[in-house]
Image (cartoon, grey):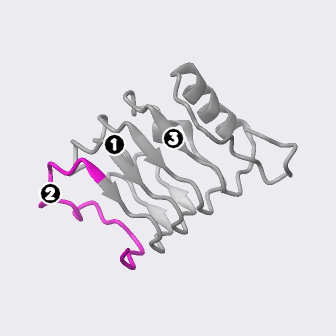
Amino acid sequence: FNLLTSIPSSTFNDVPFLRDLTLAHNPIQKIESHAFQTVPNLIKLDLSHCQLQFIAPKAFEGVELLETLKLNGNKLRELRPKTVERLSRLHGVEMHDNPWVCDCHLREAKLWLTDNNIPYPISPTCIGGPDRVL
């Protein structure tokens, strides 16, 4: 792994045909809007075990072919529905091991995943304790 702390939108300009990207175990705290727009062929994205606290609503805009997204093991407290609703080809997402705050926004994101038959192999647990499962 590298020691990436952010992902500027021009980072992947020279690799537009990139299909599988692993950025796991980097100290990335936030993903800005359009961070992956220059890699439209991206199918797998692993952002697990970073220090992610924030994902911009338009972070995944331009990567509509994305099938697998790993967000587990971060510091995410929320996931806005607008962040994932354009990912129509998503087949799986891993979101466990994050300090989720279970509110209406997270519920909407969960409903979107369920309505689109997108599996999440381990149910995320909310901050409220093990009895609070998403």
Look at mark 2 in the image and give the residue it sits on: 15
Image position, residue 2 (x, y; %): 36, 77
Check disc 1 and give the amino acid type. Glu
Is 12 on the left-hand or right-hand side of 25? left
* Quadrant of the frame with the C terminus: top right
Residue at point 46%, 52% (across, down) = 56
For the question of whether residue 11 can be seen, the reply is yes
Dot 1: what SS?
loop
Magenta stretch, residue numbers: 1-20
Q: Main secondary structure of the magenta part?
A: loop
Element under disc 3: strand
Spatial CA span between label 2 and label 3: 24 Å
Mark 2 and mark 1: Cα distance apart in space: 17 Å
Q: Residue at x 44, y 45 (%)?
A: 69
User: Which of pointers 3 and 1 indicates the residue nearer the eye?
Assistant: 3
Residue 80 image-quadrant placement = top right
Q: Which mark is residue 123?
A: none
First in residue order: circle 2 vs circle 1 = 2
Identity of the residue furthest to the bottom in this view: 3
Question: What amino acid is found at the position of numbered circle 3 in the picture?
Answer: Val
Contact? badges 2 and 1 (CB < 8 Å) = no
